[in-house]
Image (cartoon, grey):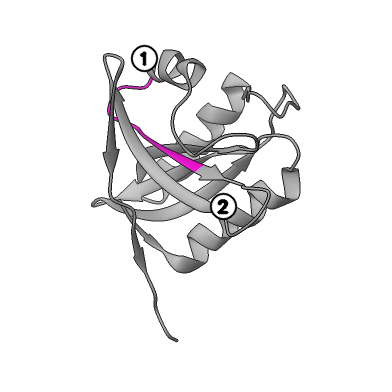
């Protein structure tokens, strides 16, 4: 996925703001490029997992489609572990084939780490996050 640095910074800021709980949200994609972010509410309000209301996902998908995009990624943060899909993430991904899983790791020391994965039939494959920097 290609993502503008401003959109990625927005996702990282969401992770920091919701810490110590996990944050979650969706990324709208057009032509393999992130074009929109929907910051969701983590109903679980937990540092160990996230839960999103189905209506919120549908609302985000509709908004993305109105902009000519589609749901391309679901993002969330890991507040106590590396940004690698947990078994819970892998299980949840079964319902979202073809969607990338963008994970923000928030280490106690150092900068946030962002990684993205495809999870198909329980198989986790890391995919490149290509950050685009635009000067206006």
Is residue 71 in sight in this rendering?
Answer: no
13 left or right of 67? right
> Which corner quadrant holds the C terminus?
bottom left
47 left or right of 9? right
The image's mark for residue 11 is 2
Task: Please name the residue shown 50% across and 60% down the image.
Answer: 7
Q: Is residue 98 magenta?
A: yes
- In percent of width and height, residue 131 lies at 36, 64
65 left or right of 52? left
Q: Which residues are magenta?
A: 96-103
Label 2 crowd (10 A; few <14 / some 14-19 / many >=20): many
110 left or right of 95? right
Task: Please name the residue shown 30% across and 22% down the image.
Answer: 97
Q: Nearer the viewer, residue 120 or 36?
A: 120
Task: Please name the residue shown 51% across and 16% down the image.
Answer: 88
Task: Please name the residue shown 63% across and 22% down the image.
Answer: 51
Q: Nearer the viewer, residue 135 or 83?
A: 83
Is residue 58 positioned above or below 107 on the image?
above
Label 1 crowd (10 A; few <14 / some 14-19 / many >=20): some
> Residue lying furthest front in this view?
109
Label 2, secondary structure: give it. Answer: helix
Q: Is residue 100 magenta?
A: yes
Identify the residue position indicated by label 1 in the image. Answer: 94
Q: Residue 65 appears in which quarter of the rendering?
A: top left
Mark 2 and mark 1 in contact (Cβ < 8 Å)?
Answer: no
Q: Earlier in the sequence, mark 1 or mark 2?
A: 2
Is residue 16 positioned above or below 53 on the image?
below
> Residue lying furthest bottom in this view?
136
**Cα distance in 3D space between marks 1 and 2:** 23 Å
């Amino acid at each position: 996925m290609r993502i503008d640095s401003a959109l990625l910074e927005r996702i990282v800021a969401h992770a920091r703001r919701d810490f110590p709980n996990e944050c979650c949200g969706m990324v709208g994609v057009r032509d393999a490029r992130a074009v929109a972010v929907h910051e969701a509410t983590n109903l679980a309000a937990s540092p160990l997992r996230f839960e999103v209301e189905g209506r919120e996902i549908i609302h985000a998908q509709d908004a993305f489609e109105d902009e000519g995009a589609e749901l391309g990624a679901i993002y969330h943060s890991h507040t106590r572990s590396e940004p690698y899909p947990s078994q819970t993430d892998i299980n949840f991904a079964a319902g979202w084939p073809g969607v990338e899983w963008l994970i923000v790791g928030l280490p106690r020391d150092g900068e946030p780490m962002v990684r993205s994965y495809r999870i198909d039939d329980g198989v986790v494959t890391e995919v490149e996050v290509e950050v685009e920097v635009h000067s206006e």
